[in-house]
């Protein structure tokens, strides 16, 4: 029988506005070499919000502030650990974040590259449709927030 394990992660759709317009931070993960949003496991005792801010800082090299929760995504996958197959049920909580400081070149060693891209570029680059949908939802939230000001 295949063992099933739950994993919980958190991450962020980190946006900034610069002279070239709206940008979102994306990361190229090792060893897969696929573009993703920065995210990772919750540490013991850590909230999803704390983990999301920490992971964005570690993987994208930037410090952000939380704006709002965007969405949580769930998916299943299998992995082999020490010759035993495990089925993983993963939940990832994503948050909309505003860039405060830092440089995407200061990412950790899990990441081949971190960069700022336009939202359209992010939607083309991201490997997973669920993350593209999260970026789209984040953009909608930003648009509603800006329209309300």
Image: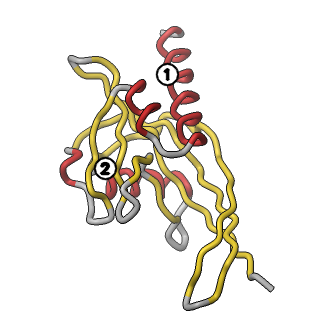
Residue 93 horizontal side relative to residue 35, left or right:
right
Q: Nearer the viewer, residue 39 or 82?
A: 82
Question: Observer-nearest residue: 131 or 99?
Answer: 131
Which residue of the protein is positioned furthest toward the right in this rendering? 1
Dot 2, crowdedness within 10 Å: few (<14), some or many (≥20)? many
Return the disc, 2 or 1, that comes first in the chain's sequence.
Answer: 2
- On the picture, is 85 further left or further right than 113? right
> Which color mode does the image show?
secondary structure
Q: Is label 2 in a helix, a strand or a loop?
A: helix
Disc 2 versus disc 1: nearer the observer? 2
In the image, residue 60 sits, relative to residue 51, either above or below, namely: above
Measured from the top left, where is residue 97 in percent x and y? 43, 37
| Residue 88, placed above or below residue 9 | below
Image disc number at residue 34? none
Q: What separation in Å lies between label 2 and label 1 (alpha carbons)? A: 20 Å
Spot occupied by residue 52 in the image (x, y as percentages of width and height): 47, 52
Q: Which residue is mark 1?
A: 142
| Proximity of marks 2 and 1: CB atoms separated by less than 8 Å | no
Viewport quadrant of the N terminus: bottom right
- In the picture of the structure, the residue carrying the numbered disc 2 is 60
Secondary structure at badge 1 equals helix
Q: Looking at the image, which is closer to me, 84 or 69?
A: 84
Crowd around label 1: few <14 · some 14–19 · many ≥20 (10 Å) = some
Q: Is residue 39 above or below residue 70?
A: below
Residue at x 65%, y 48% (from the top left corner):
73
Which residue appears at 66% of the width and 82% of the height? 85
| Residue in the picture at 24% in, 40% down | 101
Q: Position of residue 71 (x, y in %)?
A: 63, 40
């Amino acid at each position: 029988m295949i063992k099933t394990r739950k994993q919980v992660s958190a991450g962020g759709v980190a946006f900034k506005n610069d002279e070239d317009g709206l940008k979102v931070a994306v990361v190229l993960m090792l060893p897969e070499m696929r573009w993703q949003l920065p995210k990772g496991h919750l540490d013991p005792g850590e909230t999803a919000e704390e983990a999301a801010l920490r992971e964005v800082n570690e993987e994208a090299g930037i410090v952000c502030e939380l704006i709002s929760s965007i969405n949580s995504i769930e998916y299943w996958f299998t992995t082999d650990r020490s010759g035993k197959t495990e089925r993983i049920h993963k939940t990832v909580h994503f948050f909309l974040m505003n860039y405060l400081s830092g440089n995407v070149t200061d990412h950790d060693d899990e990441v081949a590259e971190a960069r700022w891209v336009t939202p359209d570029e992010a939607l083309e680059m991201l490997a997973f449709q669920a993350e593209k949908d999260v970026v789209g939802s984040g953009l909608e939230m930003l648009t509603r927030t800006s329209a309300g000001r």
